[in-house]
């Protein structure tokens, strides 16, 4: 007997809902002896009636199995009682043994039941979760299948509609044609019949082709929807245990598309082109299926719908109108995407131009890498240098926004004199950014030091030099690197080789301050020589001077003053202030001071009377007393330079807020050996240079020179450092004026412009005649305050460094000249009294003064009259005689004393 037989389709719904009751009911029917004929249980009363005796019962698949096993089931039921009695007897015999093991079995049963319960709970939970996700997946699958069936059904309906409509039109056309033929003639020729049949067959084949085209177009339209639904189904049907480990297929597809559009720059236009072609092709196929036109005309018509959405207004019929409207709608979407793509491309291009990302197509230009407060004065000097050429090109690249750089440059108050300044945003450490500014074609490359820590600035300059030397195309010009610490100069030159020229800003300013402190007025002379506004150094070869002694070449230039020779036989070494007997050789070049590189040329040798010096005067070298206010990073270098310049017995007072115990340690760490100081002795005083009572503890009236240094603690901020230096200057001058005796002040009175002698600034000016104060100024705006009051012989640090950088950028050979003039040994600038070269009331030309100075192995390059405020370098009309005063001074290049 089969108890698992499925219920028949005619069984009651109650049998489906309550299977146990249905089973009991069936079992009762099987075991009962009556009725003779089986009944089929159904809700239909006609089917529940008994069958007649002579008729065979209608057997369903379910009841066939039951009726066939009826006898066997009855026999099994008959002998069931016998088997049960034998089983009970055997159980009674084995019951004592079971009672003995009952307790053990019960214990094991309890443990097993617990384990089984736990496993059943876990199994039930897993079954519930699996069933839940299975039902969810089954539901999603049913949705996809339903969607596909709906799309297919809709496609078939549309196709049937269009085909029936076309068949009706064709039948009407055929009827009208046949009627016309019958009216024309009663009988048709056999050939006409064959032709008409062939035309009909062609029409039928074209109709099949049109139907196929329509089906293909609709299928292609439905394929993306089906693919997306399938991807969504696959993504959501993954096992929940692998969700955290595996990425869904939809996310992977989105990622691939994102990478494609990101990596390939022309992916967006390509995708738009493909979408346009697909729309035209699908629209042409659909039009071919609903119209009588051929495929080529339908494709062209589809393109017109895409290009102009108003062309579909002339369509007639439901099918053509529906297709044309769909194509026009797709064309509007494509036009919107194309408009957005073009707008984005234009915006990106303008944004790239605005942010300075475009390439600079220039050559023989000056490239400045970096941004600092020296940039303004540097651009000014480069503009003046290029004025004779009608202007030049200067490219500035820094890690700043292009608009900000252009705004800052536009605020600079000077005339660019035809020079164009181009700004670009980028890093000098990136080769792509260096190529963007045409670094390989630049005439000179200037690397500016960053504001802030000196070691970090020099480290960045070193990396920039490494990047520049790594340019594959090579460099046409040389590299000028501004460094902050002298100790890093050797490393940069080691990396850059012959391409690199270094200017150590801190060291240059320190040496200039020491020279200007010993010789008042020298700062203004250095400004005239270093800058391009007046006269500067130039080196050029003049073949007409070959074989001439240097003494004759010295007076051969009416508009220039020769200062040295670049000797070709010594590998291009520049010798300043050579001997008069040196004969110029072939290939030698002349170093001169002139207004511009094209403003001078040698002329015929003039007749100049040499004359004799008034006396063989040797300047005495006496001990001096100098005060340093503040603490610089390179204090040890300044002390060593000062020890080389001063006479034995000189004193150097250091007044700053660094503890005295730490000063010696800092100096020793910087490389200073205190035992090797031969000419000076150090005197330490601790205090704050902007507090008056601290300054009053110093003998300010007894110092020959006072140097106010930009303190190390505030050197990162130019305004703060200058404010501190200016406050110290005013306090020192005020204290000196209060301590200056009235009688001595009366003796030293000189005319000081519009300031009265009893005024506050007048008293400071009187005190300035007794001692020299050199202030290290970083901000150019502070220059006007000091120059108006005339209470300090100032040094403008940033401007002087910018001048030196501009000169070396224009001609790299000038760096050797500046290094010799700044060094402790060799030649330097001096200010000499006129009584060393002439007598009182004597009339001499400037050329005669030059020849007299040659007797002292000096080169006179300018002079300053007693009643003038500024010196004249490379004066004009050198052959004209004039009456000199013994109060006049001459500016000469001579060897260090």
Image: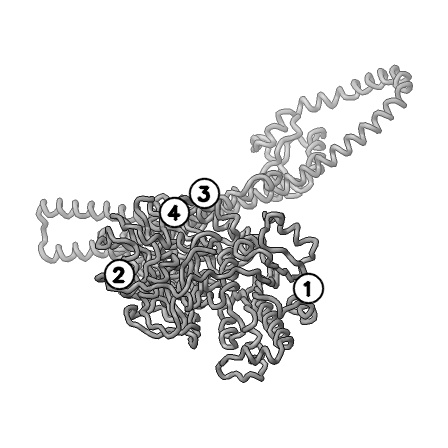
Which is nearer the eye, 559 or 351? 559
- Residue named by callout 3: 494
In contact (CB < 8 Å): disc 1 and disc 4: no
Tag 3 or tag 2, which sits nearer the N-term? Answer: 3
Task: Locate the N terminus and report the quarter of the image it occupies.
Answer: top right
Q: Which mark is residue 556?
A: 2
Q: Residues within 10 Å of mark 1 (few under 14, many from 20)?
A: some
Judged from the image, the secondary structure of the residue bearing numbered disc 3 is helix
* Residue 385 visible in image: no
- Give the side of residue 497 with respect to residue 49, left or right: left
Tag 2 or tag 4, which sits nearer the N-term? Answer: 4
- Residue named by callout 4: 499
- Residue named by callout 1: 687
Tag 3 or tag 1, which sits nearer the N-term? Answer: 3
- Give the side of residue 503 with respect to residue 308, left or right: right
* C-alpha span from label 1 to label 2: 56 Å
* C-alpha span from label 1 to label 4: 46 Å
Q: Position of residue 67 (x, y in %)?
A: 63, 28
Q: Quadrant of residue 869?
A: bottom left
Residue depicted at x 87% and y 25%? 106
């Amino acid at each position: 007997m089969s108890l698992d037989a499925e219920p028949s389709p005619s069984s009651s719904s109650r049998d489906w809902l309550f299977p146990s009751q249905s089973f009991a009911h069936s079992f009762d029917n099987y075991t009962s002896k009556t009725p003779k004929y089986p009944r089929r249980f159904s809700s239909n009363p006609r089917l529940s009636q008994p069958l007649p005796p002579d008729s065979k019962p209608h057997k369903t698949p379910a009841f066939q199995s039951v009726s066939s096993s009826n006898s066997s089931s009855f026999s099994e039921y008959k002998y069931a009682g016998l088997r049960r009695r034998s089983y009970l007897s055997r159980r009674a015999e084995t019951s004592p043994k079971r009672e003995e093991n009952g307790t053990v079995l019960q214990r094991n049963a309890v443990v097993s039941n617990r384990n089984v319960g736990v496993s059943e709970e876990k199994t039930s939970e897993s079954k519930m979760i699996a069933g839940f996700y299975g039902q969810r997946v089954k539901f999603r699958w049913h949705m996809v299948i339903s969607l596909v069936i709906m799309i297919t059904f809709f496609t078939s309906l549309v196709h049937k509609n269009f085909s029936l409509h076309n068949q009706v039109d064709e039948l009407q056309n055929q009827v009208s044609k046949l009627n016309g033929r019958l009216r024309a003639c009663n009988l048709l020729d056999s050939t006409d019949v064959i032709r008409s049949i062939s035309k009909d067959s062609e029409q039928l084949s074209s109709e099949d082709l049109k139907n196929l085209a329509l089906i293909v177009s609709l299928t292609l339209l439905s394929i993306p929807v089906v693919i997306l639904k399938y991807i969504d189904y696959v993504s959501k049907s993954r096992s929940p245990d692998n969700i955290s480990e595996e990425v869904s297929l939809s996310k992977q597809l989105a990622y691939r598309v994102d990478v494609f559009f990101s990596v390939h720059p022309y992916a967006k236009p390509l995708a738009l082109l493909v979408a346009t072609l697909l729309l035209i092709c699908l629209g042409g196929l659909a039009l071919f299926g609903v119209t009588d036109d051929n495929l080529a005309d339908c494709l062209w018509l589809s393109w017109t719908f895409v290009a102009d959405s108003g062309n579909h207004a002339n369509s007639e019929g439901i099918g053509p109108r529906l297709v044309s409207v769909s194509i026009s709608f797709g064309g509007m979407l494509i036009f919107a995407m194309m408009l957005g793509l073009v707008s984005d491309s234009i915006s990106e291009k303008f944004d790239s131009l605005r942010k300075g990302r475009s390439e600079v197509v220039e050559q023989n230009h000056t490239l400045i890498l970096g941004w600092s407060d020296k940039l303004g004065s540097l651009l000014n000097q480069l503009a003046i240098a290029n004025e004779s050429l009608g202007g030049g090109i200067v490219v500035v690249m820094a890690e700043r926004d292009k608009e900000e750089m252009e705004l800052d440059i536009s605020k600079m108050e000077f005339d660019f004199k035809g020079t164009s300044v181009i700004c670009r945003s980028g890093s000098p450490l990136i080769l792509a950014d260096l190529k963007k500014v045409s670094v390989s074609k630049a005439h000179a490359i200037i690397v500016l030091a960053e504001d802030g820590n000196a070691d970090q600035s020099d480290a960045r300059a070193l990396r920039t030099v490494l990047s520049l030397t790594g340019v594959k195309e090579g460099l046409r010009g040389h590299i000028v690197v501004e460094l902050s610490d002298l100790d890093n100069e050797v490393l940069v030159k080691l990396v850059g080789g012959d391409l690199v020229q270094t200017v150590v800003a801190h060291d240059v300013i320190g040496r200039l301050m020491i020279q200007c402190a010993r010789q008042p007025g020298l700062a203004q002379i250095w400004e005239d020589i270093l800058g391009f506004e007046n006269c500067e150094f130039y080196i050029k070869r003049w073949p007409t001077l070959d074989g001439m002694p240097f003494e004759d070449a010295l007076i051969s230039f009416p508009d220039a003053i020769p200062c040295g020779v670049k000797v070709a036989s010594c590998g291009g070494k520049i010798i300043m202030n050579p001997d008069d007997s040196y004969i110029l050789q072939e290939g030698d070049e002349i170093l001169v001071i002139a207004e511009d590189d094209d403003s001078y040329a040698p002329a015929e040798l003039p007749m100049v009377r040499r004359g004799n010096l008034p006396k063989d005067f040797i300047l005495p070298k006496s001990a001096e007393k100098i005060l340093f206010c503040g603490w610089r990073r390179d204090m040890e270098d300044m002390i060593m330079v000062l020890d080389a310049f001063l006479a034995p017995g000189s004193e150097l007072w250091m007044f700053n807020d660094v503890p005295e115990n730490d000063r010696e340690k800092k100096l020793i760490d910087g490389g200073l050996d205190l035992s090797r100081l031969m000419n000076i002795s150090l005197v330490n005083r601790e205090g704050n240079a902007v507090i008056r009572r601290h300054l009053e503890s110093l003998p300010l009236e007894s110092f020959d020179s006072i140097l106010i240094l930009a303190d190390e603690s505030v050197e990162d901020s130019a305004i703060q450092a200058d404010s501190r230096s200016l406050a110290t200057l005013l306090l020192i001058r005020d204290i000196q004026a209060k301590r200056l005796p009235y009688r001595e002040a009366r003796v030293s009175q000189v005319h000081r412009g519009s300031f009265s002698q009893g005024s506050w600034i007048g008293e400071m000016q009187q005190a300035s005649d007794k001692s020299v104060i050199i202030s290290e100024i970083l901000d150019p705006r502070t220059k006007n305050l000091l120059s108006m009051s005339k209470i300090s012989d100032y040094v403008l640090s940033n401007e002087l460094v910018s001048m030196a950088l501009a000169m070396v950028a224009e001609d790299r050979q000038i760096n050797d000249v500046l290094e010799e003039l700044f060094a402790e040994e060799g030649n330097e600038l001096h200010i000499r009294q006129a009584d060393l070269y002439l007598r009182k009331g004597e009339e001499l030309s400037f050329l005669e003064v030059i020849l007299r100075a040659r007797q002292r192995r000096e080169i006179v390059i300018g002079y300053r009259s007693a009643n003038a405020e500024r010196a004249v370098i490379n004066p004009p009309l050198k052959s004209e005689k004039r009456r000199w005063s013994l109060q006049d001074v001459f500016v000469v290049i001579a060897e260090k004393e």
